[in-house]
Amino acid sequence: MSHLDNIPSTPGKHKPDKAFRFHSSAASSSLSKLTLYSTLFLSILLIFLLLLSSPSSPPSPRRHLSTGSHHTPLSLSHKLIRKSARPRSTTGHTVLVTGAAGFVGTHVSLSLKRRGDGVLGLDNFNHYYDPTLKRARQKILEKAGVFIVEGDINDKGLLQQLFDAVLFTHVMHLAAQAGVRYAMQNPGSYVHSNIAGFVNLLEVSKSANPQPAIIWASSSSVYGLNSRVPFSEKDRTDQPASLYAATKKAGEEIAHTYNHIYGLSITGLRFFTVYGPWGRPDMAYFFFTKDIMKGKTITVYESPDKGSVARDFTYIDDIVKGCLGALDTAKKSTGSGGKKRGPAQLRIFNLGNTSPVPVSRLVSILEKILKVKAKKKVVPLPRNGDVEFTHANITLAMTELGYKPTTDLEAGLKKFVRWYLSFYSGSKKKSSW
């Protein structure tokens, strides 16, 4: 934002003090006051004019609509943006995908584009994990005709430019600061992205005409210390076990607010431990594979009762089907230009595999696929935000979205390992999808 943005467009008018009266006995004092007020007013006016006439500061790199590490001229970017966002037919959707170079974002963007929807990506390519992987995903998307604008969801000016350039029918909001444990190291990044960034996106969306429907990624982490299984959308979610979970829960409440006040159609999706090719290196299945192959010892957590920690591992293709199902069944927002015209759709769904698997079983499957015996160190589950188990009740998603996961953990891990070995072997085929 330019430093001029906070300066009023016109200076305030000088208003003489109503109690001021000019009497000969007070002429000297009054004249001094008038001189002082006039000087102050002229000084303020001079400063304002100087600021107004001075060249504005160079725009932030994020204000450039860019792709890759180089910046593309604005006029060229607009052409690429419109081409990428143009659906194949008049019945297709026009979708802004935030976090498009992320794991889920890349898969969703490709699926939308391949079926004929217009897709525009947005990603800030942060360094939470190796951005090389994100750049590789970006190349895949570029080949498929998906343009990624390099920028941050907290840059309201950039978001406004995108909404001015394209009439989005939907926003698939997948950008977020992920990871449960990292929140203990960098808590501010979670508030910045998962709360402030989300609000920023909703602010621009609610002012659009027409307003887009919003589909966004919440998390199974919101169930926190809930002990009822399987986790249902009707269960309490007011006991988060991590800051990450707390920011996602806050996001759900914020979504309710914008739906209620502005008429935005909003659908939240609670993802359960997503895995698969092109996944995130901070996930257990990913770094277990890496460490097992290198002969390093892996740490496996156990619950207080000496049982194995369990997760409802959900394969990426199943998650994508759920995302597209949510988008296709999303009703239009009812607001216009920031004003609500009627009640709008508000939904939340679990997207899981509804089949929890102990982490010890995950390790056994990887040993079988990699044909390498893992060196394991079993330790108690630390108080770092992790929970003992997750288990999704997906009845609602099955009924309303037609969601039906079909990939079991062993089949999914085989696909992941095949991709992993190809990508990190330096093979020329590593960018294939």
Image (cartoon, rainbow, N blue to C red):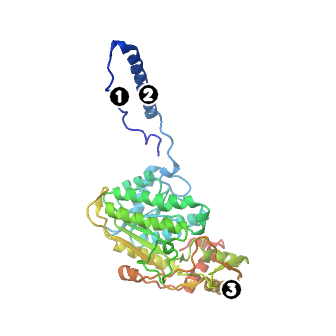
State yes or no: discs 1 and 2 in contact (Cβ < 8 Å).
Answer: no
Give the amino acid type for the residue marked by disc 2 in the picture.
Leu
- Give the numbered dot on residue 14: 1
Residue at 33% x, 15% y is: 23
Characterize the local packing of mark 1: few (<14), some (14-19) or many (20 or more) Cα atoms within 10 angstroms. few
Separation of marks 1 and 2 at Cα, in angstroms: 14 Å
Q: Is residue 253 placed above or below 72 in the rendered structure?
A: below
* Residue 144 is at least partly visible in this image: no
Residue at image x 53%, y 86%?
Answer: 408
Q: Which mark is residue 304?
A: none
Label 2 residue SS:
helix
Where residue 303 appears, x then y in whole percent?
Answer: 62, 81
Under mark 1, the amino acid is His
The residue carrying mark 2 is: 46
Report the mark closest to the observer, 3 or 1.
Answer: 1
Secondary structure under tag 3 reads loop
- In-front residue for pair 364/25: 25
Disc 2 vs disc 3: Cβ atoms closer than 8 Å? Answer: no
Instruction: Determine if residue 216 is in view.
Output: yes
Q: Position of residue 125 (x, y in %)?
A: 55, 60
Q: Is residue 153 above or below residue 6?
A: below
Query: Which residue extends farthest left?
Result: 341
Please give the label number shown on residue 371.
Answer: 3
**Distance of label 2 from label 3 (alpha carbons):** 76 Å
Given this view, does label 1 or label 2 mark the residue nearer the observer? Answer: 1
Name which of mark 1 and mark 2 comes first in the sequence: 1
Question: Position of 219 compared to 366: left or right?
Answer: left
